[in-house]
């Protein structure tokens, strides 16, 4: 099943969105068909497809599975239906350790069903799931923003890909640009502000260009989220790896710099590290976070927070996007960050005192109306507000296992151990072109 690996057989974003590639990741086609049929038949299974797509953490609260047999039964049903993966069963068979399954083929099938089902309402589904299961809501509303991005992606897919999928047997998942994604996330007025914006922070070697002229040259692909338990594994080699799996990243717990990262390729189709850019997201839900805060963007300096290696900083010219979502009460607004000095939006500088990166920075306050398209879709703003008002160590799970390599293989992209990747990806990730080997220092013995 895994004889064809990413970066060996599949080297471009077109390759990894093909049916041929997708069927090699996760459960087999027959299992997928069975699960999709179940998903389509029952409303409860339709709700639970949100689990894998948004990486909902069923272990994130102290709900007490050892005391609630009904919860244990529900967890087992999710595991048996490929919605979660069991990675550990401690002594006493109490709190089963499981993770949201990273199965691109199931996530894409679930996306198709969700967007073509007139009775499916995402905020209703999330409210139902959060009330029925011991799920972490996130401290600041991270779940909501992840859901906004997922729905914006599906809205794009609904508008452009319906005639192709599933009739074209070679193309399984849509490829889109950053502009495509954000034009379905923000309403037209605010997307216009974004499109006409110049960089807030600029590398010396990057020209001052409008957002619309820059990010039309990008390519993205994601249909679900992965949340690694290790915060020091999220960097550009990691990002190109999980993008090849059709995933974006939820930040590890207690990671202060960012809450999620959406990777993209800049001006290429090749899966190479040096062409990876990203949208970095920070989410706040506090009355003290209603006005733009320069310090939050300084924390999201990509070199400071490890998304870009320090040694690569001087040559890092791929433009990035940083957005803070301040979801607390207040008048909805969207604005470009305009810094009075070079030091306000960055913490790493070259020898001439210029920032070592280029970033288009934006501050988004509130959740509607007429701000975010997913919030206003189907008149669902009240339900999103309800979700917002309800806004909680993985290492030892693997290290104490009798078969850590097997458990790690069931959590692809979940950390920096080789076994999270070896079943589906080559260890050498090309840097500049599909024929150039990665630097020797990037190997599976990460430190």
Image (tube, rainbow, N blue to C red):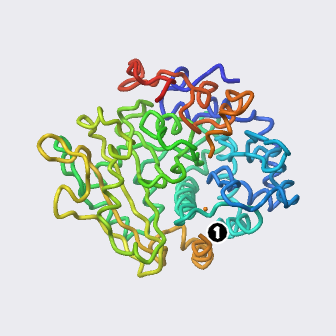
Q: Is residue 259 left or right of residue 49?
A: left
Q: Provide residue 361's location: percent of width, then percent of height.
A: 31, 59
Near-viewer residue (65 or 50) = 65
At x 57%, y 72%, the residue is 388
Q: Provide residue 164's location: percent of width, then percent of height.
A: 60, 45
At x 50%, y 68%, the residue is 373
In the displayed orientation, state which residue is furthest to the left: 352
Q: Provide residue 383's location: percent of width, then percent of height.
A: 63, 75
Q: Is residue 42 above or below residue 350?
A: below
Residue 18, by quadrant, is: top right
Q: Provide residue 36's location: percent of width, then percent of height.
A: 77, 47
| Element under disc 1 | helix
At x 62%, y 72%, the residue is 390
State the count of labels: 1
The residue that mark 1 highlights is 123
Q: Is residue 150 above or below residue 420?
A: below
Residue 314, by quadrant, is: top left
Q: Is residue 264 above or below residue 71?
A: above
Near-viewer residue (58 or 122) = 58
At x 33%, y 58%, the residue is 297
Residues packed near mark 1 inside 10 Å, few (<14), some (14 to 19) or many (20 plus): many
Q: Is residue 213 left or right of residue 381?
A: left
Q: Quadrant of the N terminus?
A: top right
Q: Is residue 438 above or below residue 195?
A: above
């Amino acid at each position: 099943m895994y004889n064809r690996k990413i970066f060996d057989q599949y080297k471009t974003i077109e390759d990894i969105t093909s049916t041929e590639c997708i069927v090699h990741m996760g459960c087999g086609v027959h299992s997928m068909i069975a699960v999709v049929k179940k998903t389509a038949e029952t409303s409860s299974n339709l709700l639970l497809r949100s689990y894998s797509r948004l990486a909902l953490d069923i272990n994130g609260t102290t709900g007490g599975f050892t005391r609630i047999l009904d919860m244990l039964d529900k967890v087992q049903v999710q595991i048996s239906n490929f919605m979660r993966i069991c990675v550990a069963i401690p002594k006493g068979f109490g709190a089963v350790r499981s993770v949201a399954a990273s199965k691109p083929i199931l996530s894409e099938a679930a996306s198709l069903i969700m967007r073509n089902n007139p009775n499916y309402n995402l905020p209703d589904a999330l409210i139902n799931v959060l009330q029925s299961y011991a799920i972490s809501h996130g401290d600041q509303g991270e779940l909501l923003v992840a859901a906004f991005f997922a729905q914006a992606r599906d809205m794009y897919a609904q508008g452009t890909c319906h005639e192709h999928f599933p009739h074209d047997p070679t193309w399984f998942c849509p490829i889109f640009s950053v502009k495509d994604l954000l034009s379905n996330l923000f309403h037209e007025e605010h997307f216009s502000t974004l499109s006409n914006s110049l960089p807030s922070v600029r590398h010396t070697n990057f020209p001052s260009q409008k957002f619309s002229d820059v990010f039309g040259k990008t390519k993205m692909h994601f249909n679900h989220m992965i949340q690694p338990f290790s915060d020091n594994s999220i960097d550009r080699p990691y990002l190109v790896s999980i993008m090849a799996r059709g995933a974006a990243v939820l930040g590890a717990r207690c990671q202060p710099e960012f809450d999620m990262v959406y990777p993209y390729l800049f001006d290429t189709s090749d899966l190479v590290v040096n062409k990876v850019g990203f949208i970095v997201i920070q989410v706040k839900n506090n009355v003290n976070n209603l006005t733009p805060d320069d310090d939050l963007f300084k924390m999201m300096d990509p070199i400071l927070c490890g998304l870009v290696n320090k040694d690569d900083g001087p040559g890092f010219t791929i433009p990035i996007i940083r957005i803070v979502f301040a979801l607390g009460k207040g008048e909805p607004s969207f604005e470009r960050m305009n810094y009075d000095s070079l030091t306000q939006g960055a913490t790493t500088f070259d020898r001439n005192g210029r920032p070592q990166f280029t970033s288009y920075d934006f501050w988004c306050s509130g959740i509607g109306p007429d701000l975010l398209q997913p919030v206003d879709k189907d008149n669902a703003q009240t339900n999103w507000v309800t979700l917002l008002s309800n806004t909680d160590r993985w290492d030892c799970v693997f290290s104490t296992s009798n078969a850590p390599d097997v458990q790690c293989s069931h959590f692809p992209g979940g950390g920096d151990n080789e076994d999270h990747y070896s079943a589906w990806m080559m260890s050498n990730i090309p840097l500049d072109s599909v024929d150039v080997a990665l630097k020797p220092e990037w190997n599976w013995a990460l430190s």
